[in-house]
Image: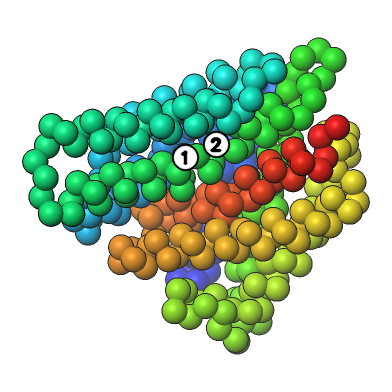
Amino acid sequence: MSGTRLSFYLRLSSTVLLWIVMLGTIFAGFPIGCLLLIAALSLSALYEFFHMLGAQKIPCFKLTGMIFATVFLVADFVYLSRPGLAGFDIDLALLVAFIILVFARQMFAPVRDREPLEAMAYTLFGILYIVWLFSFLLKILFLTPATPSGATTGQFYALFAVAIAKFSDMGAYAFGSLFGKHPFAPHISPKKTWEGFFGALISSIIAAYWMRALMADQLSLIGFWDATFLGLVLGFVAVVGDLAESVLKRSVLAKDSSHILPGIGGTLDLIDSVLFTAPVMYFYLRWFVIP
């Protein structure tokens, strides 16, 4: 079996397994299950980020960052699950507390050139880039109206955002592999092509229509034009999210964030596009869809 074919089958197997776990969690209807899944993915991705920094001797507060990320996600979930509370109050309070914490931590360590500043900056960046952006899936979970029995409905809109991102990834991969000839961003990722970019957008729009038709009851707030706009915009930001992680990996001389997922790489490689689609989906729902 050729290396390309083996890589494809490994990638397919990992993708199918992950979708089974995610769909099972979402359709089970337990918000705590969504929290555990989101926490597991974001904490794993954050750990990979810190590990990549450590491999290049870039300073960061790994333990402090991991503990804070866990507290942030749990506090966000508890706070958002209480009706009538502003979703960003807890985010701002915890981020302010974290900034104070990292400065307080540094007060008990020697100052060596730019190392303390770099450690604080890289740690905060990891929290914002991975944990805070991914936490928008939690915000979507409690954003849409609950059912008469009190069950959440937001998990289906979070699934919509994730599906668009992953169809964008698959469309870019398929179209780029089959038709790719014109480099898109060779200074960032030599394999990215314009054919793959447009394939990503086409696949995202198709996915939006397909999700809306397949889950008409669960996604009743999304109309035809909503699906069209979200398919295009989420598909675009998914490409940006993928390239953003490529910039990060190129900066630390890493091919993949880790090797935990055969054929895919690491958890950060898996969720990179979702990091941008989740907040865009949240704000679109909040500003234009939620009555």
Residue 201 image offset from top left, x and y in percent? 72, 66
Point 23% across, 31% down: residue = 104
Amino acid at circle 1: Val
Point 55% across, 27% down: residue = 89
Element at badge 1?
Answer: helix
Task: Say which residue label 1 marks.
Answer: 131
Q: Residue furthest top?
A: 149
Element at badge 2?
Answer: loop
Q: Residue furthest bottom?
A: 181
Q: Residues within 10 Å of mark 2 (few under 14, many from 20)?
A: many
Of the pair 148 and 210, the residue shown nearer to us? 148
Residue 220: image tag: none
Of the pair 238 and 168, the residue shown nearer to us? 238
Of the pair 23 and 223, the residue shown nearer to us? 223
The chosen color scheme is: rainbow
Point 84% across, 57% down: residue = 228
Task: Say which residue label 2 marks.
Answer: 135
- Mark 1 vs mark 2, CA separation in Å: 6 Å
Amino acid at circle 2: Ser
Residue 96 image offset from top left, x and y in percent? 41, 32
Asked if labels 2 and 1 touch by Cβ distance under 8 angstroms, the answer is yes
Residue 32 seen from this side: no
